[in-house]
Image (tube, rainbow, N blue to C red):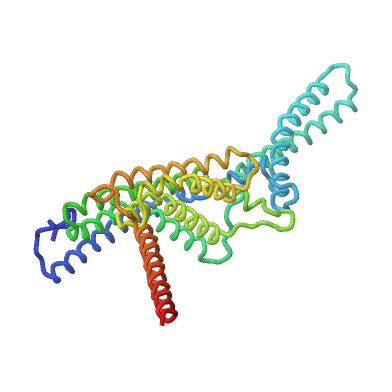
């Protein structure tokens, strides 16, 4: 069975052939995932650095919390390391100056002996400072903590697996599309194929936007929230789970145009309704952006708000472009409202007929 191209819509195959095709496509997906996992596990250090970067950026020296014990320790280590580096050449210069003083002809023997002894002690101190300077840490950023014996391996394995899944996602989606595509005729493919292209592109755009824009600000805010009351320690398992869920949600949020296109094709909404309601939607997006980015500056709010507004405008364009044939149609909600109005008019008509009947009966009784 072909696994890199879909079967034609007119082809007739048995259920066994369908199952065989499904098995073949699943094997292709598994093989692709294994190859991608081998690469991501090989490059696990680089991938972990990428995932940890938002956490590192939130813990830079200029952003350390003076009320947090871990941040105070990191600041002390950094300042101590810098002091040792600056003190080493100073002691070396002082030792050389003492040797020069001891070599002067007008200095007494006792002073020369004292200067020579001090120079020797300074030489030893300089050597010790040089060793300490070479041993001083250069990376003062905090990294996620691991509490179990196997947690470093499990965390590395998990992050590599998620990265491999992200790399394999286009292949998996293509195999899924190719498996279900024969069920659609030519008119249906006009809508399905753009959906196939939009889903991975929008998901990737959401993940990139989340990683470069939203995630660093979220990590910085959550870490500094009420930090004076807590000794903040970041566990690797919880941090990586948070990153995966956060980026996954951002990828799903960017699927708004796809969801709107599906609703349009099923008659739930249309482009005209979306255009009329865009003022309320933009207001809701502004509120959502303000809640999602609790920083006081308006720039952060606008950076979060603009992509969502553009996605909504794209949704309106797609709803107009892929509207059902036959021009403007009533949506299901409009049909429901029309049915309610018809029922109300029918009820009023029945009440009017009943009133006329009662009036006619009353009039007949009066005449008799």
* Image side of residue 27 versus residue 282, left or right: left
* Image side of residue 147 versus residue 38, left or right: right
Q: Is residue 102 above or below residue 84?
A: above
Of residues 282 and 17, the one nearer the viewer is 282
Q: Quadrant of residue 353?
A: bottom left
* Image side of residue 186 versus residue 115, left or right: left
Q: Quadrant of the N terminus?
A: bottom left
Residue 142 spot, x, y in % from top left: 61, 50
Residue 221 spot, x, y in % from top left: 63, 49
* Image side of residue 223 versus residue 27, left or right: right
Of residues 107 and 32, the one nearer the viewer is 32
Residue found at x 17% / y 64%:
21
Q: Quadrant of residue 355?
A: bottom left
Q: Quadrant of the C terminus?
A: bottom left
Residue found at x 16% / y 52%:
186
Residue 105 spot, x, y in % from top left: 85, 16
Q: Residue furthest top?
A: 106
Q: Is residue 150 above or below residue 4?
A: below
Residue found at x 41% / y 57%:
162
In the rendered picture of this protein, how many numbered marks are placed on residues?
Answer: 0
Residue 345 spot, x, y in % from top left: 39, 64
């Amino acid at each position: 069975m072909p696994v890199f191209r879909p079967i034609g819509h007119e082809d007739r195959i048995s259920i066994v052939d369908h199952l065989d095709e499904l098995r073949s496509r699943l094997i292709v997906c598994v093989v692709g995932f294994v190859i991608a996992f081998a690469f991501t596990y090989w490059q696990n250090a680089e991938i972990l650095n990428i995932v940890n970067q938002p956490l590192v950026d939130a813990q830079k020296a200029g952003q350390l919390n003076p009320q947090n014990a871990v941040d105070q320790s990191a600041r002390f280590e950094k300042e101590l390391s810098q002091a040792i580096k600056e003190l080493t050449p100073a002691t070396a210069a002082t030792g050389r100056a003492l040797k020069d003083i001891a070599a002067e002809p007008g200095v007494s023997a006792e002073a020369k002996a004292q200067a020579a002894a001090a120079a020797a002690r300074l030489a030893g101190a300089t050597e010790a400072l040089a060793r300490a300077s070479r041993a001083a840490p250069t990376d003062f950023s905090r990294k996620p903590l691991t509490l179990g014996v196997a947690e470093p391996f499990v965390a590395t394995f998990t992050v590599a697996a998620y990265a491999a899944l992200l790399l394999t996602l286009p292949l998996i989606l293509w195999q899924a599309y190719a498996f279900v595509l024969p069920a659609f005729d030519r008119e249906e493919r006009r809508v399905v194929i753009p959906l196939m292209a939009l889903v991975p592109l929008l998901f990737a755009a959401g993940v990139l936007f989340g990683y470069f824009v939203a995630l660093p600000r979220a990590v910085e805010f959550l870490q500094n929230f009420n930090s004076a009351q807590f000794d903040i320690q970041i566990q690797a398992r919880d941090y990586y789970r948070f990153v995966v869920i956060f980026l996954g949600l951002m990828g799903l949020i960017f699927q708004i145009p796809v969801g709107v296109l599906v609703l349009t094709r099923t008659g739930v909404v249309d482009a005209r309704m979306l255009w009329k309601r865009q003022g309320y939607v933009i207001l809701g997006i502004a509120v959502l952006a303000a809640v999602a980015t609790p920083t006081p500056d308006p720039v952060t709010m606008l950076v979060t708000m603009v992509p969502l507004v553009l996605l909504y405008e794209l949704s309106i364009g797609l709803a107009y472009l892929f509207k059902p044939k036959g021009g403007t149609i009533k949506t299901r909600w409009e049909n429901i409202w029309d049915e309610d109005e018809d029922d109300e008019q029918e009820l009023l008509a029945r009440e009017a007929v009943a009133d006329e009947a009662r009036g006619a009966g009353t009039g007949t009784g009066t005449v008799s």
